[in-house]
Amino acid sequence: MLGAAAAVGLGAVADSVLSATPAGATTGNMQYGVSNNANTAATDLTSTATSQTLSIENTGTGAALYLQGLNGSCITADQEGDAYVLFARTNGSGAGICMITNSFTNINPTIEAVQEGLGNPLYCEILNTGSSASAIVGTTNGAGVGVEGRSTSGYGAEFNGGLAPILLIPGASAGPPTSGTHAVGEVYVDSVGVVWTCQVAGTPGVWVPALVGGATNVTAPTTLSVPPGSDLVTLTVENTGTGPSGAALVGSDGGTGTVGGVRGELDNVANDSPAVEGITNGTGPALAGACHGAGYGAALEGGLAPLWLQPAGTPGPPTSGAHQLGELYFDVNGVQYRCVAAGTPGTWVPQYSVVPLMAPVRVINSSTGEGGITGPLVPGVTVHTSSVLTGLNGIPAGAIGVVANLAVSGVGGASLNGYGVMTIFPAGAATPGTANINAGAGSFAESNAVTVAFGTGAEAGKVSIVWNGGGPVPNAQAYLDVNAYIL
């Protein structure tokens, strides 16, 4: 039904057939009724036909239907049947439908279509394949929306095009909008083709670039920000390619810059997250730094330490996997290993460090039971510490051995009264056939510098001592003074 705001008065027509030119018609206008004056009472055009109620074809260069509303909507149409509410076709260069609202106080849309059936409320089609015109054009000179689509259960809009589903006209400059009030969800394309979305409403709001695909380059200075309260990552870059050396993210200074290509910075001093984090599920490195000039592959600085290599959960070097020359590895005890030959698992050697104590510390005194050994030592009987030596007296729990001075003396100040041999070795290991101290007849005490490793497993942090000899060896006391520990 064509409502009261139609500019052309149309009387009742049976079965969509216009009669011969009636009285009152004027040249150049298709008129049915008694007047062409918009101020007269409107008439309705009704039909009981199963096809279009009104069909107007213009083979010229003008509009097939031109409606102008001075106050209300240009056209209001209601169709409860199965046909189109409004169908307009032009074979020329003019518009199928052209409607203009001149009222500056009218807030109604120029065209509004409502469909209660299964069809499309508004359907526009250009049949001329050589045409470059748009099927639908919505233009507003105010603050409203040129074209608006809404759906309560489906999509607000659906687009399909031979070149692309949708064309967003780029802005005049690079970067996001810098003025105007914007709402969350706005999408903007700048002059270099970067797509920006408004993430926080404001003037001009907070905009973030949508970096998608390998051909997207952000050439303008860009700041990626996340709204307060969000626990999402600021930027996620996914590489689904199959190239052998393609990176998900590459930072470059362009060849002329003096700053880093990629920089990660945490402004919140309470944050315990890494500034840059790389995770890989493949065999490549999570982070790779390479310098092809005279610089360094990586420069690290930290308030706690320049570098943290997280220890493994087991003692010893890797026992599986293919490894490369130059790899570094820390085991659960804090021992650092380096790969000296590539292979599976490769050849690994420990990187021991000897750390001196500020002053020597006595950790075993069998005359008092210090260190878990209570004397006197019986010849031929191996004894070891009943409690670990690590974690005490400045020796850290991760130490694997000590540099110390081992001494033996007679019981109660008496002479050793014979030849004796004392050996110290890792607890739990077989007694070696070597000696650390060889005591002579008539001596009261003997000592020697030793380097000894701790036992492992259940004997971790412990040492064993055996006192023996080839002659009439009496009982003796043992002493161990640590000068340094080994990591």
Image (tube, rainbow, N blue to C red):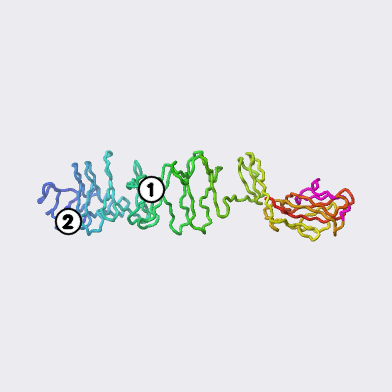
Left/right placement of residue 204 relative to residue 263 reads: left
Spot occupied by residue 246 in the image (x, y as percentages of width and height): 49, 40
User: According to the image, label 1 marks what residue?
Assistant: 195
**Amino acid type, label 1:** Val
User: Disc 2 or 1, which lies upstream in sequence?
Assistant: 2
Q: Is residue 78 visible?
A: no
> Quadrant of the image for the N terminus?
bottom left
Q: Is residue 361 visible?
A: yes
Spot occupied by residue 370 in the image (x, y as percentages of width and height): 77, 59
The secondary structure that most of the magenta stretch takes on is loop
Q: Give the Cα distance between marks 2 and 1.
A: 51 Å
Q: Between residues 177 and 305, which one lies in front from this camera angle?
A: 305
User: According to the image, label 2 marks what residue?
Assistant: 43
Spot occupied by residue 259 in the image (x, y as percentages of width and height): 46, 46
> The residue tagged with tag 2: helix, strand or loop?
loop
**Amino acid type, label 2:** Thr
Left/right placement of residue 300 relative to residue 50 reads: right
- Do the residues bearing badges 2 and 1 touch, measured as CB atoms within 8 Å? no
Left/right placement of residue 405 relative to residue 158 reads: right
Q: Residue furthest left?
A: 23
Q: Dot 2 surroundings within 10 Å: few (below 14), some, or many (20 or more)?
A: some
Residue extent of the magenta highlight:
415-439
Spot occupied by residue 374 in the image (x, y as percentages of width and height): 80, 59
Residue 116 lies in quadrant: bottom left
Instruction: Give the residue at x 79% y 48%.
Output: 436
